[in-house]
């Protein structure tokens, strides 16, 4: 069977205009494989302000898609963009036994079940049930940490396919900048409160933090009013690249587990010095010189890392960036993700 004869039904509740790593993954993957397969996309669009769909919208989408799958003809591959939607894959499998089931595994898909509360235990049992119902499903894990979690839940056929970024390198600034930069959802789990309240007070008053992204809650909104913060709102890819490259350091201080940590990869590609929390997928993304790692929630260690970068002279900074950018560009590109995914589609 040639690639052009392969029919793929891609189902996702993560789609534009919502903004996030999973939305980027879905958009870029489908864009890069559409010329190689007969592609059908069933997607739930995000909200106009860039946020994810409501819980009501997600439930409605799931029910409508389930009934739709009962009527649709067979596809060679049914690819679900997240693990939590596995019941839709089961319906597709029951309707057409020959369809090849592929599930993408991201951070929150499996990490939520690692908690101690009742809901976490219930979700873990739900995922284990998915492994029992879909024993031959192919799991595409975006980090080795997520791959290990998938196997721990009982999934057998797990493949490691790191994410990528299509961001373009920005113009390099010969002058060492003085401001820090954060991009992403402005919320406690992403570490913005930690940086503003605990790390900035340990740094010189002249050091400010520029923030780009979506405000997720009231706490995030309050942070943007801090005198040492400049909130830039949502930026397009070109503007983001310029901010990454112009920053003293790009901070990825996530407190919660990260399946991959796309911001770290794209910041390095753009030409930024990345400092990220040393845990889960972020540790993997920033390995081999792509970025620097700091102890999670350790304000003093973060301040020391930032101060060390601020002390670099121009030649040391240029040498670091040359290595990190080269490593990131070779490892995190969508052509490689598409190639690896197409291989997983084929028997």
Image (cartoon, helix red, strand yellow):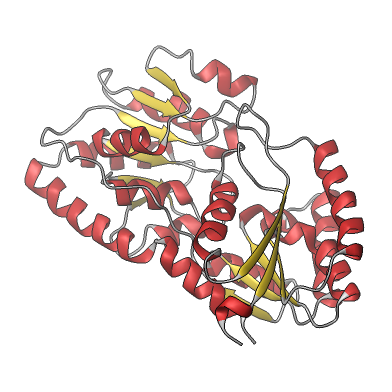
Instruction: Work out which quarter of the rendered image holds the N terminus and state it.
Output: bottom right
Residue in the image at 68% along x and 32% along y: 47
User: Where, by quadrant of the figure, is residue 346 drawn?
Assistant: bottom right
Front residue of 98/35: it is: 35
**Relative to 91, is 227 above or below?**
above
Residue 347 screen position, x and y as percent: 65, 87
- Residue 294 visible: no
**Relative to 213, is 134 above or below?**
below
Residue 144 screen position, x and y as percent: 53, 70
**Relative to 29, is 171 above or below?**
above
User: Where, by quadrant of the figure, is residue 231 drawn?
Assistant: top left
User: Where, by quadrant of the figure, is residue 342 drawn?
Assistant: bottom right
Front residue of 98/101: it is: 98
Residue in the image at 32% along x and 50% along y: 268
Front residue of 29/248: it is: 29
Residue 204 screen position, x and y as percent: 26, 22
- Residue 215 visible: yes
């Amino acid at each position: 069977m040639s690639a052009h004869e392969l029919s793929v039904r891609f189902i996702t509740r993560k789609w534009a205009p919502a903004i996030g790593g999973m939305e980027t993954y879905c958009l870029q993957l489908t864009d890069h494989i559409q010329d190689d397969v007969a592609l059908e996309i069933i997607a739930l669009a995000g909200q106009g302000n860039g946020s994810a769909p409501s819980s009501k919208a997600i439930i409605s989408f799931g029910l409508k898609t389930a009934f739709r799958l009962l009527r649709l003809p067979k596809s060679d591959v049914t690819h679900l963009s997240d693990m939590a939607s596995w019941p839709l894959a089961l319906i597709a499998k029951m309707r057409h036994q020959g369809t090849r089931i592929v599930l993408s595994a991201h951070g929150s898909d499996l990490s939520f079940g690692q908690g101690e509360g009742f809901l976490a235990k219930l979700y873990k049992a739900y995922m284990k049930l998915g492994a029992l119902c879909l024993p031959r499903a192919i799991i595409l894990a975006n980090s080795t940490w997520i791959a290990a979690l998938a196997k721990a839940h009982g999934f057998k056929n797990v493949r490691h396919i790191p994410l990528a970024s299509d961001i373009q390198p920005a113009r390099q600034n010969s002058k060492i900048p003085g401001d820090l930069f954060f991009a992403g959802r402005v919320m406690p789990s992403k570490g913005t409160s930690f940086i503003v309240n605990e790390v900035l007070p340990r740094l010189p008053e002249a050091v400010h933090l520029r923030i780009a992204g979506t405000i997720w809650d009231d706490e995030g909104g309050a942070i943007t009013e801090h005198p040492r913060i400049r909130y830039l709102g949502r930026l397009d890819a070109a503007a983001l690249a310029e901010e990454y490259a112009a920053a003293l350091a790009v901070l990825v201080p996530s407190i919660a587990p990260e399946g991959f940590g796309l911001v770290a990869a794209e910041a390095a590609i753009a030409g930024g010095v990345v400092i990220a929390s040393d845990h889960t997928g972020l540790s993997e993304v920033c390995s081999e010189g792509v970025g620097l790692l700091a102890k999670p929630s350790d304000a003093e260690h973060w301040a020391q890392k930032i101060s060390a970068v601020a002390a670099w002279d121009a030649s040391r900074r240029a040498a670091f960036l040359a290595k990190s950018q080269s490593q990131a560009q070779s490892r995190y590109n969508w052509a490689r993700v598409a190639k690896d995914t197409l291989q997983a589609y084929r028997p």
